[in-house]
Image: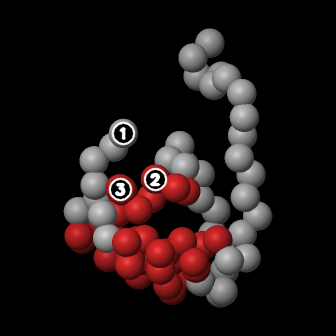
Amino acid sequence: MSKRLDVQRIMLLMEYIGDQHRKKPIIIASLLPVFAWHKIIGDDTMANAMLVRILQEAHRIELQGESLREQ
């Protein structure tokens, strides 16, 4: 799994999410499942704050099956 984000990247991501929250739609495509965000961010408070803003009105689409990249 990926290493933790550095503090500067966490702050930039939080600032962006905070600025866009409820103003404009945000599309996030990630290979990282939601449950793993806390580990990558490394700060439970920041991870919770981001996830609340992102997920409270989200339409989540989780794809299942084999990756087409591997074929």
The x and y percentages for residue 31 are 53, 43
Badge 1 local density, few (<14 within 10 Å), some, or many (20+)? few
Can the viewer see residue 21? Answer: yes
In the picture shown, does residue 49 fall above or below 3?
Answer: below
Residue 1: assigned label: 1
- Give the position of the C terminus as an image quadrant: top right
52 versus 6 height, above or below: below
First in residue order: circle 1 vs circle 2: 1
Q: Which mark is residue 36?
A: 2
In the rendered image, the quadrant that contains the N terminus is: top left
Please give the count of numbered marks on the rendered protein: 3
- Residue type at mark 1: give it: Met
Q: Residue furthest top?
A: 71
Q: Tell me the distance, in whole angstroms, between the alpha carbons under discs 2 and 3.
A: 7 Å
Badge 2 amino acid? Ala
Residue 35: percent from left, percent from top: 52, 55
Which type of secondary structure does the marked residue at label 2 adopt? helix
Residue at coordinates 67% horizontally, 23% vertically from top-left? 66
Q: Amino acid at mark 3?
A: Ile
Q: Residue at x 23, y 70 (%)?
A: 7
Contact between marks 2 and 3 (CB within 8 A): the answer is: yes
Q: Dot 2, how many residues are within 10 Å of its Cα: few (below 14), some (14-19), or many (20+)? A: few
Q: Is residue 53 left or right of residue 15?
A: right
At horizontal 60% and vertical 73% (from top left) the residue drawn is 54
* Labels 1 and 2 touching (C-beta < 8 A): yes
Q: Are marks 1 and 3 in contact (CB under 8 Å)?
A: yes
Which circle marks residue 13 in the picture? none
Residue at 58 percent of width and 22 percent of height: 69
61 displayed left or right of 4: right
Q: CA distance from mark 1 to mark 2?
A: 9 Å
Residue 27: x, y in percent? 64, 62
**Number of the label disc, if any, that sits on residue 40:** 3
